[in-house]
Image (cartoon, rainbow, N blue to C red):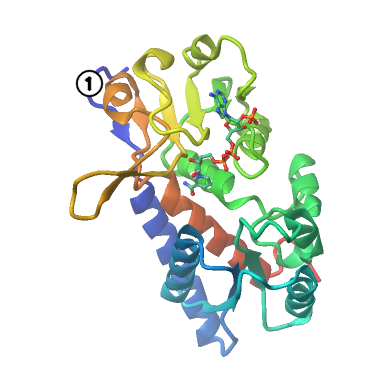
Amino acid sequence: MSEKSPILIDGKLIAATIKEEIKKEVADILDHGQRPPHLVAVLVGDDGASLSYVKSKEKQSQEVGFTSSVYRFPENISEKELLETIDFLNKDNEVDGYIVQMPLPKHIDSRKVTEHIDPRKDVDGFHPVNAGRMMLSLPCYLPATPYGIITLIERAGIETSGKHCVVLGRSDIVGTPMALLMSRKGKDCTVTLCHSKTQNLKEICASADILIAAIGKPAFVTEDMVKPGAVVIDVGIHRIKDDSEKGYYVTGDVDYKAVAPKCSSITPVPGGVGPMTIVSLLTNTLKAYKKEVYKD
Ligand code: NAP
């Protein structure tokens, strides 16, 4: 057990390695005279964070050799028009997978939009069919962030069998699927899923061998919430304003400085879970192209 120097789980490096693997596979596809995989992002409105996520997805898709398209719509697009776009994408044989960047404007029912996506093209893994198949351990597209974390844990060689994994946060896209995946055969953790009504949160977190923080509150996890030698995975991303040239710094849900010396390994923010999320979207798109999940 390390007291002072935890192993840094380098998501940036692991993501770069996976991207190289995808790039090689795409080059091979092109060598065989076939078209590259095609990922589409649908973006509604001008939200800065959404725009920067979509740009990053577009850039990284192109880096691995995918065709990448962005369908941009103004904030006032009607729900009907958006659903028609989705119908079009569902039918387009040249599109392997697509994502609808969330959040959507309030006048659009996000749930309805997600359910309209053909599960075979749902590379974000948000459609109820993919969520249900995940629950039953059937082939499916796993949601990108939990999929990225699982891959990170595997590639970093972290032992999970029989460990107590505490997941902090129960959102549909991060905490809940994360808890499920860690409890499944192969990972074999005993999982506790915590949320805003959890009692004795500190004690529960301090009993974790693996603590996954996806709570959306900067530096929420403090040193006294972490067991010596624990593995800590920080999912949070927060931009905190400061006097630097950039005007902000990026931090996670974990008080890294205080917690890191106590851990056996920990993910940094930035450079931990973040890069793994996009790479998992690319992996899902390649799977969609190869019809690995759904055969027709
Ligand atoms: P979310 O939908 O806001 O969910 C937050 C969860 O934390 C909820 O389940 C909430 O409980 C729980 N919570 C809030 N305050 C709490 C408290 N004081 N004690 C215990 N539980 C509490 O957030 P999310 O979408 O899962 O995202 C979580 C974080 O991950 C955010 O910082 C987000 O930016 C980041 N994120 C990062 C990536 C990436 O690629 N790295 C991807 C997605 C999200 P209730 O359910 O009871 O309200």
User: Which residue is at the front of the view, 282 or 40?
Assistant: 40
Q: Is residue 177 left or right of residue 259?
A: right
Q: Secondary structure at mark 1?
A: loop
How busy is the neighbourhood of tag 1: few (under 14 within 10 Å), some, or many (20 plus)? Answer: few
Residue 164 image offset from top left, x and y in percent: 56, 19
Residue 17: % across, % down: 39, 58
Callout 1 amino acid:
Lys
Instruction: Reply above or below: 169 against 115.
Output: above
267 or 158, nearer to the observer: 267
Total count of labels? 1
Q: Is residue 83 left or right of residue 63?
A: right
Looking at the rendering, the quadrant in which ligand 1 lies is: top right
Q: Residue at x 60, y 87 (%)?
A: 34
Answer with left or right where residue 195 lies relative to residue 56. Answer: right
- Give the residue displayed 42% in from the left and 44% down from the top: 237
Q: Position of residue 198 (x, y in %)?
A: 62, 17
Q: Residue at x 76, y 57 (%)?
A: 109
The residue that label 1 is drawn on is: 4
Write down the quadrant of residue 4 in the picture: top left
241 w.r.t. 223: above or below: below
> Looking at the image, which is closer to me, 119 or 22?
119
User: Measured along the vertical axis of the image, is residue 150 above or below residue 296?
Assistant: above
| Quarter in which the N terminus is drawn | top left
Residue in view at x 30 percent, y 26 percent: 260
**Which quadrant holds the C terminus?**
bottom right
Q: Residue furthest bottom?
A: 33
- Residue 76 location, x and y as percent? 66, 71
